[in-house]
Image (cartoon, helix red, strand yellow):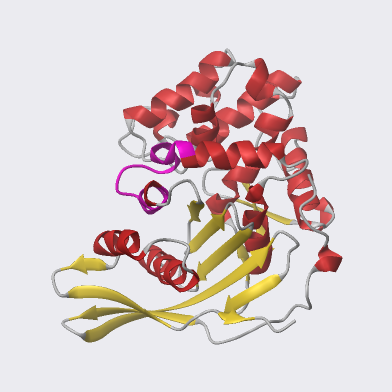
Amino acid sequence: MKCFSSSSSLPRHFKTQPLQVELKRSCNVESRHCVHAVVCDTRGRILMCAGNADHLTFIRSALKPFQALPFISSGTLDQLSCSMSNIAIACSSHSGTALHTREVFQILWNAELDVELLQCPTPVGARSQLEHNCSGKHAAFLATCRHMSWPLDSYLAGDHPLQLHVRGQVGTLLGVSPDELVVARDNCGAPTLLLRLSQMASLYACFKGSGQQTSLKQISQAMLAYPELVAGSGCFDTELMNQCSNQVLSKGGAEGIQCLSHISKGLGIAIKVEDGSRRAKHAAAIHLLSQLGWVETTKLSQLGKRFLAIAPEVQLEVSGSLCPRES
C-alpha cells in the first residue's frame, strides 16, 4: 500500500508568502488570519505552496480516513457485511443527527457490540456517545478489534495492536518508520499525529487508489458516495463534495486543518490556519480550488454564498496564491 518513498520527495524547507484571509465589515478589515497551504502528488513531491510547506502541526480529524484503513484491510468490513455507508461514517466528523447515529449503531450491531463500549465522550445535552462527532471512528475501531480478537477496553491506547496498525499503514504511505511518528491524544481520546503539512497533502494525494491501495480507493468512493454522512447538511465537507461530481474529496480537522484530494489527478492539498479559525480554512479552500480549477466557477459561487458571506455586509476575502515549486 506504499504511496511514495521519502527519498523521492524534493528537498524540504520550501516557503513562500502565506495566504491571508480577511473578514471585512462594510469594507473595513475587522480580522485577519494567516494560512499555510501545500499541494503534493502521489510521490510526495511538493508541487505548489503558500506559506510554509513543512509547517508542523497535528492532523486532527483529517486523519480519520486513514484510521479507517484497518476496518477494511483486516477483513472486518466484509466479515461483518458492513456497507459503503458504514465506511463513510467511520471517516466522519458527523453532526450527530439520527441519520448519523443509525449508521454508527449499525456497525456496532453487526459486530455484536454494546454502545457503552464506545470511549468517545457523550456530548453535552446528548443521550449517548453515538451523538459524538467521532463515534463512527470509534465504532469501526471496536468492530475491528472484535474481528481481530484484540482487547476492547484498551483500544485507544497508543500501544494497542489497532493503533500500531494504523501508524504502520500511515508510515508505509509516507515512507517513514511508524516509530518516527509523533502521537498525541485527540479530544475524543483517540491518537492523532504530528505531521508536516506536506505529509498531510501527500496522504490525501494517495486516494487515487491505484495498485495495492484498494482500501484507500474504497474509502474515497464511500466518502464521495455519502457526503452527508462525512459531516452533515450545511457543513463544508458535505456541501463541497455534493458540488464536485465525485472528483474532490474533503475532510477537515479541528484548529484550522482542511485537507482535499483530487481523485483522478492524484493530488492532495493540506491547509492550516495558524490561529485555528474554521471560517478561514473554508475560505482558503474555496480560494485554492478556484486557483487550481478543480471546481467549476458556478459551483464555487454557491459555496461562497454559504461560507464567505458571513452576514449582511460581512464578507471573507482571501489574498495570495499558491507558488509553483521549481524542480
Q: Is residue 125 left or right of residue 136?
A: left
Picture coordinates of residue 59, whole percent (x, y)? 59, 57
At 55% across and 28% down in the image, what residue appears? 139
Stretch in magenta? 225-241
Quarter of the figure with residue 158: top right
Q: Is residue 325 above or below residue 154?
A: below
At 55% across and 52% down in the image, what residue appears? 62
How many marks can you see?
0
Picture coordinates of residue 162, whole percent (x, y)? 73, 34
Q: Is residue 97 above or below residue 12?
A: above
Q: Is residue 78 above or below residue 123?
A: above
Say if residue 196 shows up in the picture: no
Residue reaching furthest to the top: 112
Q: Is residue 114 left or right of residue 32?
A: right
Quick check: is 229 in the magenta stretch?
yes
Q: Is residue 158 above or below residue 262?
A: above
Instruction: Work out whether residue 111 or residue 185 is closer to the camera in this orientation and state it.
Output: 111
Quarter of the figure with residue 218: top right
* Main secondary-structure element of the magenta-colored stretch: helix
At 52% across and 43% down in the image, what residue appears? 188
